[in-house]
Structure formats: structure tokens, C-alpha cells
């Protein structure tokens, strides 16, 4: 689960993606963000860490390569920033 992802990514990756993860709601400058945005950023950070190798990123995230591919396709079709690939 999450332990595998945390162990596979750089120590600051989780903080960089969700800097307020350990903060109490309403404290400091915490701004809630849509879960879809956090998920996309986490997946894209994982892909970047693994040099774009989808199989390794999917394994670290505990999702199938198909799920990863489907998410990337959905984001691309929606015009959201994401992985730049021309081979699909």
C-alpha cells in the first residue's frame, strides 16, 4: 500500500504533493484541494520519479498499468496537464 509508494519515492515527494497532509483543517494556510487534483499530481510525480516507466510507477502506486493508462488518457482528453506521450 502506501508504504510501498512512500519507500519508492523521494522523501519530500509526499510533502511536495500534499504539503498540508499533516495539518489540522483550519490551521495555518491549509487549503483543501480536490482529490482528483492530488491524485493526478501524485501519479505524475511517480511517473517522473521512475523516468516515465509506467510499469514501475503503477507497481509503486499499487494500481494496474491499465488503470494508469486509463487515467492518463482521461486527463489528456480533458486537456489537463499530464504526461507528454505521442505513442498512444
Image (cartoon, rainbow, N blue to C red):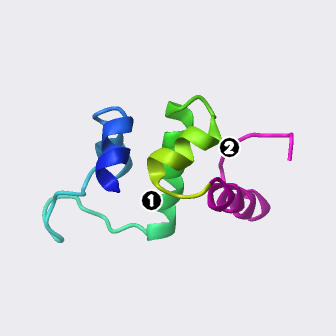
Residue 47 or residue 34, whichever sits in front: 47
> SS at mark 2?
loop
Residue 72, x across and y down, in percent: 68, 55
Tell me the quarter of the picture where residue 16 sits.
Answer: top left
Residue at point 45%, 70% (across, down): 34
In the image, taking residue 23 as reference, residue 53 lies left or right, namely: right
Label 2 belongs to which residue?
83
Residue with the most extreme right position: 87
Residue 33, x across and y down, in percent: 40, 66
In the figure, 62 relative to 34: above or below?
above
What is the span of residues highlighted in magenta in the rendered image?
65-88
In the image, taking residue 74 as reference, residue 13 lies left or right, namely: left
Q: Is residue 47 visible?
A: yes
Residue at point 59%, 57% (across, down): 64
Residue at point 61%, 42% (across, down): 55
Residue 47, x across and y down, in percent: 56, 40
> SS at mark 1?
helix
Quarter of the figure that contains the N terminus: bottom left
Q: Is residue 44 visible?
A: no
Residue 9, x across and y down, in percent: 38, 36
The span from disc 2 to disc 1 (Cα, nearest Å) is: 15 Å
Residue at point 55%, 39% (across, down): 56
For the residue carrying disc 2, how many other residues have a C-alpha within 10 Å: few (<14), some (14-19), or many (20+)?
some
Label 1 belongs to which residue?
38
Query: Does the stretch in magenta take in 77?
Result: yes
Residue 2 or residue 39, whichever sits in front: 2
Amino acid at each position: 500500500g502506501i508504504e510501498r509508494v512512500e519507500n519508492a519515492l523521494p522523501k519530500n515527494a509526499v510533502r511536495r504533493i500534499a504539503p498540508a497532509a499533516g495539518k489540522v483543517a483550519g490551521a495555518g494556510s491549509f487549503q483543501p484541494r480536490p482529490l482528483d487534483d492530488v491524485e493526478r499530481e501524485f501519479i505524475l510525480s511517480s511517473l517522473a520519479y521512475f523516468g516515465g516507466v509506467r510499469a514501475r510507477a503503477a507497481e509503486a502506486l499499487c494500481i494496474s498499468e491499465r488503470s494508469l493508462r486509463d487515467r492518463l488518457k482521461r486527463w489528456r482528453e480533458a486537456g489537463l496537464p499530464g504526461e507528454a506521450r505521442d505513442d498512444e
